[in-house]
Amino acid sequence: MLLYVFYILSAITLGTAFLTVISKNAIHSAIYLVVCFFSLAGHYLLFNAQFLAVVHIIVYAGAIMVLLLFTLMLMNLNNEDETSKPLYTKFAAVISAGLLCLVLIAALRKALPENIEYVNSGTDFQSIKVLGKVLLNEYAVPFEFASVLLLVSMIGAVLISKKEEKI
Amino acid sequence: MNILETVGINNYIMLSALLFCIGAFGLLYRRNAIIMFMSIEIMLNAVNLLLVAFSSYHEDPSGQVFVFFTMAVAAAEVAVGLAILVSVFRNIGNIDIDNLKNLKG
């Protein structure tokens, strides 16, 4: 049962990711990407990581996609704006991505151990309580630096996108 | 019960690799800068998925904490990147990255 859920979710993830990449209209790409993020949140739910799934939906499907769609609508691009590239660059992109895929999958297939044991000790390791303790004890310094990073990026984004005054 | 007992870590590794390759393909194939940002998000999400899978495999919460940091960095990256794109659009009128070749010499 769970295996079928995994296969369906994986098909949705890969399919919508591919449609994101190849669809002509940028708005359609954004919508497909939202579906892709929701299916990834479904994967996190399969891992029983509820908090991570909720945070993923809030941050990606909420904040980042709204930002992307807002920018897309601000620019008001037409389909004709994207100049058609020469055929050989597209061909090179397809070839290099295919080679990357081939190398990654070949390497990972050979790197897998023969018999894997899955430990299931039943200990609680991914509830909000445990994650909060780990985040604020072991990873307190990176946590603080993440807040500094977000502050700096916020100030930087405002500063860059502000209209320049004529000197 | 653990999902890895029914699905197996191999399937997740393959799914992650395929998702990463789709992101890399989009980055190479498209010229629209916003679609390239979306491809970068897909690649980051592939890595996040594998981090969560191995966190569940080892029963270690550190993997999920790293996913939180990745999300914070992705949010900061998108904010600054889109601000740069808005600035580029205001100056040259489109966001085709083939037009950004002033440094080519």
Image (cartoon, rainbow, N blue to C red):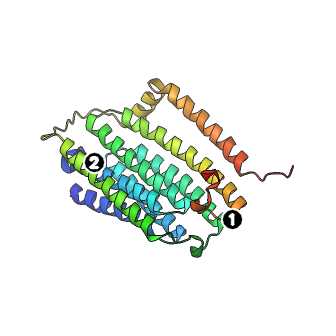
Q: Is residue B85 above or below residue A116?
A: below
> Count the marks: how many?
2
Q: Secondary structure at mark 1?
A: loop
Give the percent coordinates (x, y) of residue A159.
72, 45
First in sequence: mark 2 or mark 1?
Answer: 2
State how far apart marks 2 and 1 are (Cα). Answer: 41 Å
The answer to which of A155 and B21 lies nearer the viewer is: B21
Q: Identify the residue at horizontal 30%, vertical 39% (top origin).
A: B54
Q: What kind of residue is marked 2?
A: Ile
Q: Residue furthest right?
A: A167
Q: Identify the residue at horizontal 69%, vertical 65% (top origin).
A: B93
Q: Is residue A133 above or below residue B68?
A: above
Q: Identify the residue at horizontal 63%, vertical 66% (top origin).
A: A73
Q: Numbered disc 1: what chain? A: B
Q: Identify the residue at horizontal 51%, vertical 29% (top origin).
A: A142
Q: Residue furthest front?
A: B105
Q: Secondary structure at mark 2?
A: helix
Q: Name the residue that disc number 2 marks.
A: B13
Q: Indicate which disc residue B93 carries.
A: 1
